[in-house]
Image: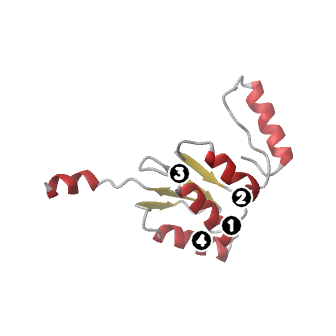
Amino acid sequence: MEGALAVAARAREGFASLGLDNILLVEGNFDDTLEEALSQMPAAELVFIDGNHREDPTLRYFRQCLRKASDESIFILDDIHWSREMESAWEQIKAHPDVRCTIDLFFVGIVLFRDAFRDVRRKADT
């Protein structure tokens, strides 16, 4: 997904030059395209959020993608320290009950959902 049409065109050229024909490039504002794109996916396994760098849109994109997340999903958020709003969004994402682990690499944040101890707890409960 790409909001900047010039960047999308460049990406399309790159995909074509590499002979990649299994990529669906969605052009347009995330607010207009994300929900439809997610509805066509069975799961959101790898998500890279680099859209609107404000708190509310970032949290909205996270929540939308979260509906398609699984234990195997990895979300990457760009520019988590870009502004106070982005830092606030990052803090809220880290505190979300479905998030199991976060990694702050300063420029990007990585979010993991796998409950590594779920199977251990199940065995202990039986």
Residue 20 in the image: above or below residue 121: above
Q: What is the CA distance from the residue labelled 3 to the residue labelled 1?
A: 18 Å
Q: Secondary structure at mark 4?
A: helix
Mark count = 4
Q: What is the CA distance from the residue labelled 4 to the residue labelled 1?
A: 9 Å
Instruction: Say whether marks 3 and 2 touch (CB < 8 Å).
Output: no
How far from the left and from the top, in percent, is residue 126? Answer: 13, 54
Instruction: Say whether marks 2 and 4 touch (CB < 8 Å).
Output: no
Which residue lies under the disc numbered 2?
51
Of labels 3 and 2, the one closer to you: 3
Q: Answer left or right for 14 relative to 66.
A: right
Instruction: Say whether marks 1 and 2 touch (CB < 8 Å).
Output: yes
Residue 57's tag is: 1
Q: Between 63 and 80, which is closer to the camera in this rendering?
A: 63
Q: Secondary structure at mark 1?
A: helix
Dot placed on the residue nearer the N-terminal end, 2 or 4: 2
Dot placed on the residue nearer the N-terminal end, 1 or 2: 2
Q: Residues within 10 Å of mark 1 (few under 14, many from 20)?
A: some
Q: Secondary structure at mark 3?
A: loop
Which residue lies under the disc numbered 4?
89
Dot placed on the residue nearer the N-terminal end, 3 or 1: 1
Residue 68's tag is: 3
Q: Answer left or right for 65 relative to 18.
A: left
Of labels 4 and 1, the one closer to you: 1
Dot placed on the residue nearer the N-terminal end, 3 or 2: 2
How far from the left and from the top, in percent, is residue 58? Answer: 65, 65
Q: Quadrant of residue 109?
A: bottom right
